[in-house]
Amino acid sequence: MYNGGKIITGLVIFLALVTFPIYYSVGKSNPHPNPSLDTPVINKMPVKHCVESREFMRADHMKLLRGWMKTVLSGKSCVYVSSTGEKYDMAWDTCWNCHSNKKEFCDRCHNYMAVSLPCWKCHSEPNT
């Protein structure tokens, strides 16, 4: 084992290079995205609210949209009654009416979370 020093030195350099991204990013964090709610419809609202609460929409909006999809495709009632008792049509227009800026609203958070949107497999993207 005449090359033991070279092997150990090579392993140390290899481990340093492989783990460099981990050490480089320690203590750093990406700022959370702040989706833009600056749309004409939202700006006109005296009280800004969504179909459900902000906390619910942040955590479970995809469950809500998938539930809407299953309900609409099964031919059942296409009216959603929110937790506040308000009624909404289960349609893309319900969302796009207020959230018309896809790049500033949807894409900002989904890119931050590295989530791909399955919506566009069936639906065409809105012109924003």
Image (cartoon, helix red, strand yellow):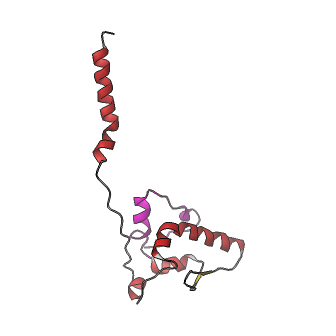
Q: Relative to residue 115, is residue 40 drawn left or right?
A: left
Is 46 contained in the magenta span?
Answer: no
Nearer to the camera, 9 or 127: 9
Q: Position of residue 124 (x, y in %)?
A: 54, 68
Q: In the figure, 1 relative to 19: above or below? A: above
The span picked out in magenta is: 100-128
- Which quadrant would residue 108 be assigned to in this image? bottom left
Q: Position of residue 43 (x, y in %)?
A: 38, 85
Residue at image coords 38%, 77% = 37
- Which quadrant would residue 6 be assigned to in this image? top left
In the picture as drawn, the residue positioned furthest to the top comes out as 2
Q: Magenta region's main secondary structure?
A: loop
Q: In the figure, 103 relative to 86: above or below? A: above
Residue at image coords 28%, 51% = 27
Residue at image coords 34%, 35% = 18
Q: What is the quadrant of the C terminus in the image? A: bottom left
Is 104 contained in the magenta span?
Answer: yes
Q: What is the quadrant of the N terminus in the image? A: top left
Nearer to the camera, 35 or 57: 57
Q: Relative to residue 10, is residue 48 drawn left or right?
A: right
Q: In the figure, 15 relative to 63: above or below? A: above
